[in-house]
Image (cartoon, helix red, strand yellow):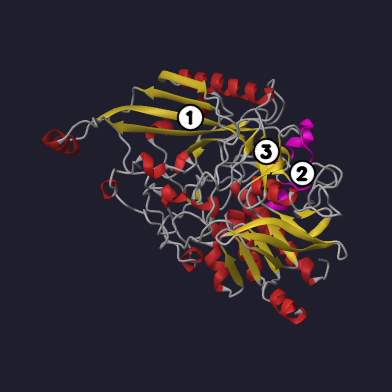
Amino acid sequence: MSNLNLKAKQTTTYDAIVIGSGASGGWGAKELCEKGLKTLVLERGRMVRHIEDYPTASKAPWEFEFRGVVPIEKRSGIGAANWGREETMHWALAQDEQPYIEEKPFRWFRGYHVGGKSLLWARGTQRWSDFDFEGPARDGFAVDWPIRYKDMEPWYSYVETFVGFAGSRDGLDVLPDQIVQPGFELSCLEKYYSEQLKELYGDRYLIQGRCAHLTDPQQIHKDQGRNRCMNQNMCNRGCVYGGYFSANASTLPWAEKTGNLTLRPDSVVESIIYDEQKGKAVGVRVIDRLTQESIEFYAKIIFVNASTINSNAILLNSKSSRFPNGLGNDNGLMGKFITCHNYRGKGYATFEGFRDKFNDGRNPGHAYVPRFRNVYRQETDFLRGYAIGMSGSRQLDGNGELIGDALRDKLLNPTYGIWGMAAWMQGEMVPEESNHIRLSPDEKDKYGIPKLIMSVEWKDNDNKMTADFVQQQSEMYERMGFKNISVSDSGAPPGSDIHEMGGVRMGNDPKTSLLNKYNQLHHCKNVFVTDGACMTSGSTQNPTLTFMTLTARAANFAVDELNKLNL
């Protein structure tokens, strides 16, 4: 029997395990497999293969029975209303898959399938600057980041070269330039807004949004089997061209080509296994989603990339005599200082000019105003700042009630309405200890895993920041001659941005942080956390590029340490 057990363990042993198959997990798989490590990637959701598992990709509206509307009876048991149309219904999460307890209102968007949220993200990608990495040190909220821009710069370039981004190089110190392909042209109204910002304010800029789309594919992208973005704006269905970056189109197939990848979907990770005698983690315990069987897999190093909240949950549930409060959680800070982006501020206004122009085609990105508040000095009654996403376009006059000849004539002789400019804030939420997640002591999900309790709320700083956006955006519209101005606080709860961060933060001091500068758990060196859970603070920029970059950097460090027999 002992020989049989030994043989069984050999078939479940790898050099490395990556928990999660999304943007950061895919990068972990790519880097580890390229370096020769036999790597197991665990995904709690179903298998999704690039191209063949995108059932609604490129379909026209008339190809859906009800033009995309899903009858109520077919939506029964589906929890994610944002995927409630037929075009994206295949990404929806069943209500009983992972219920959580909202101690305070929180919207938690998840992508439980191979590729995770890399198939669902908005694809905005900007580098962070030292204004972001130095934020906590400047105002004392959160702890100092153990890294700076110079530590990330070569790795940003490394990731950008492989992924491919569209955008502009703008020479702004608040938003470092990056490796980009030609961006998506600004509309005439956006160009007007950009010119007016410079003239009226001097220190505010509207630029092309940088996004993870290929506009001029290089050989490295063709080698991945990817091609140019076709501007279909159907990205959330899955892109058969690989025109935007996803783990399915890029990093996972690349890892698979090495022959070192084993991908196991339907694997709900319950905990990480810690060996008291060896003083390190030795494996991962999963519940098979389809059979409910408990299975253990073993490896020398473990990367935790299950997305911010699930990574926290897995580590908190990884208890042992050495770590009764969760793996590496000696200071009791795990699950605390959860942050996200503040999207509460929304604006819209119309513009009377440019009646001789209209916008044609589709833009999968949008214009972008980098942070301009509290950059060089503290100038407001709130800490940090916000960026603004913007989109200016001219809509067709339409009447959805027309049928027959009237509808045909309208389509053949289109007329355009006035121009409009939308705006939405992306504010940095300052991390505070009271914003946390924790495991329920008595409620469990259908896999027998403790339910999560969400206790995250907006603070006074977020309220003041939102009020400033409303005031400033209204003023900018007014000074530029816009009409019908409407800027307000939507009151959306935390999590509405899909940018959760924190809980297993990086830092120099094990007393105040969980991870070191290479994303290792201070007290369990062969476990690395490189998704949003590792973030010390949140910045105003989109975080996914930084997640991927931290993962590539940490994976290369891990392989070096493994080769030196330090892990």
Q: Is residue 289 left or right of residue 208?
A: right
Q: Which residue is mark 2?
A: 334
Q: Is residue 416 left or right of residue 551?
A: left
Q: Amino acid at mark 3?
A: Ile
Picture quarter containing residue 354? top left
Badge 2: residue crowd in 10 Å (few <14, some 14–19, many ≥20): many
Which segment did they paint magenta? 132-152
Name the residue: 58% across, 40% down.
108
In this view, the residue in front, 477 or 437, is 437
Q: Amino acid at mark 1?
A: Ala
Q: Which residue is mark 3?
A: 453
Q: Is residue 72 magenta?
A: no
Label whose residue precedes the other's in the sequence (1 or 3):
1
Badge 1: residue crowd in 10 Å (few <14, some 14–19, many ≥20): some
Q: Nearer the viewer, mark 1 or mark 3?
A: 3
- Screen quadrant of the N terminus: bottom right
Alpha carbon distance from label 1 to label 3: 33 Å
Residue at the bottom extreme?
A: 3
Percent x, y of residue 281: 78, 62
Marker disc for residue 423: 1
In this view, the residue in front, 555 or 356, is 555
Q: Is residue 67 left or right of residue 33?
A: left
Q: Amino acid at mark 2?
A: Met
Alpha carbon distance from label 2 to label 1: 35 Å
Q: Is residue 473 above or below residue 123?
A: above
In this view, the residue in front, 208 or 84, is 84
Q: Are marks 2 and 1 in contact (CB under 8 Å)?
A: no
Label whose residue precedes the other's in the sequence (2 or 1):
2
Percent x, y of residue 536: 73, 42
